[in-house]
Amino acid sequence: MVPVISARPAIRNLQRGIALLYEDRDILVVNKPAGLLTMASDSEKTRTAYFILTDYARKGRSKSRNRIFIVHRLDRETSGILLFAKTIEAKLHLQQHWDSTEKKYLAVVHGRMEKETGIISSYLAENKAHLVYSTSDRSKGRLARTAYRVLEQTKDFALLEVDLLTGRKHQIRVHLADIGHPVVGDTKYGKENRGHRNLALHARSLSVTHPFTSERLTFETAAPAYFRHLMGT
């Protein structure tokens, strides 16, 4: 049986709403809040999960040689499970075996879904404005496949469990917009804001094989309260 490590209670609450869920000699697992970058950008260097966790690993000592390593990323607007490595060996092993990692998300989308389950498949490419789009031309894009299952529906919204069968930039957001059900609050790929400022996309769980013990671990966390508010529960 695969061990499931719940997000509640967190081992420790760090800066800017980051909750530390799990830590051992090789990996760190956190619950990242929406609005926080995974790593630095040209305009933001310190308000990032990477900066905060590096400071945590160094225990506030800037000259410490302790480091953490980025294994994967979540968009700034996306909340949820984020995994970091504590050694370069762990990072490389995790990335080399990333295809075996299972990633599930929760999304609230506009409209009622006609099908209870489905798989969306297309080739994803990126234009000069850094917008990702679907194409049927395999020479222009990379194959992306997204599975979904309807968990709840209201008159205006649907709550979906989304399974990333591939891991491409903005894959979930583009694919759900493609089928006419953009993620609530998605001002980049949704047709309009409709008064919702927060992106309703959450990395719900991550199942990964530990880089050295080979134990299969599953980390889970509940969706933000915003999702329940949208669904009226």
Image: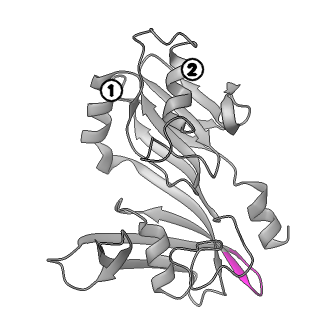
The x and y percentages for residue 1 are 50, 38
Give me the residue at 40% from left, 44% from top: 72
The x and y percentages for residue 2 are 50, 38
The x and y percentages for residue 214 are 35, 29
Residue 101 drawn above or below residue 90? below
Disc 2 target residue: 56
**Magenta-highlighted residues:** 152-158
Q: Quadrant of residue 127?
A: bottom left
**At numbered mark 1, what does the secondary structure look like: helix, strand or loop?**
helix
Q: Which one is in front, 76 or 149?
A: 76
Q: Residue 90, which numbered label?
A: 1
Q: Dot 2: few (<14), some (14–19), or many (≥20) neighbours within 10 Å?
A: some
In the rendered structure, the answer to whether residue 134 lies left or right of residue 182 reads left
Residue 198 drawn above or below residue 219? below
Using the rendered image of the protein, determine whether residue 106 is visible from the camera's viewpoint: yes
Q: Quadrant of the C terminus?
A: bottom right
Give me the residue at 18% from left, 76% from top: 140
